[in-house]
Amino acid sequence: MSTARQELLKLLAQKSFRLGEFKLSSGATSDYYIDCRTTTLDARGAQLVGQVFLEEMRSQGWHADAIGGLTMGADPIVVAVAVISGTLHGFLVRKAEKQHGTAQRIEGFREKDARVVIVDDVCTTGSSTVQAIEAAREFGFEVAGVMCLVEREDAHGRPNVEKAAAPASFLSIFTATDVRKEHLAIST
């Protein structure tokens, strides 16, 4: 594991992982919660996210023009990767089209037929990631790959995202098990 990746895991475990009883957006309950924004919006966390995502994209050979995802979880990841890369553009997918102005669902980079990577902060059921994939393709983007920062390892999450992403592949930087293990190691 690269030094940046190790540091990012430690930061997620310290800042973003909590044990307790939580209701998830899916309606399910969990004995832990991961709020990646406390890491992705941290100054050092943003640098690490940009570096780790960019390294992973390069190692996968995903030559992309832009990176984007569903607002709000993807927003800091998109900006971090775009800034660190110096060449990738960013775009955000609204949950619904604007009802005013140009009524766009895709904000930012908007070149049809461009190769893009879809990102998300946490993947549980995969529904927000799937929404972003579908909106990107409807707009006219070619999805080169799909990534999330933390995969909660829900029984349906990965299959849902893989089905929607195909033929592009889906990968997670970390699993919830990785973050929990690191959290417990640094808490003792």
Image (cartoon, rainbow, N blue to C red):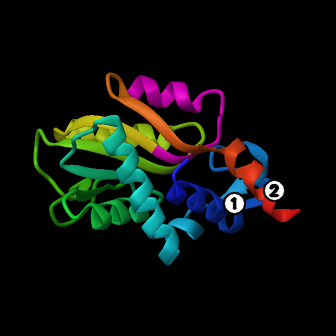
Q: Are marks 2 and 1 in contact (CB under 8 Å)?
A: yes
Quarter of the picture holding the C terminus: bottom right
Residue occupying image coordinates x 37% and y 65%? 80
Q: Which mark is residue 185?
A: 2
The range drawn in magenta is: 148-164
Pick out the residue farthest to the bottom. 43
Circle 2 residues within 10 Å: few <14, some 14–19, many ≥20: few
Circle 1 residues within 10 Å: few <14, some 14–19, many ≥20: many
The percent position of residue 79, horizontal first and vertical second, equals: 34, 65
Type of residue at label 2? Answer: Ala
Image-based side of 18 in relation to 7, left or right: right
Residue occupying image coordinates x 35% and y 40%? 59
Q: Give the mark, 2 or 1, whose residue is nearer the N terminus.
A: 1
The percent position of residue 178, horizontal first and vertical second, equals: 68, 45
Q: Is residue 161 magenta?
A: yes
Is residue 95 visible in the rendered image? The answer is no
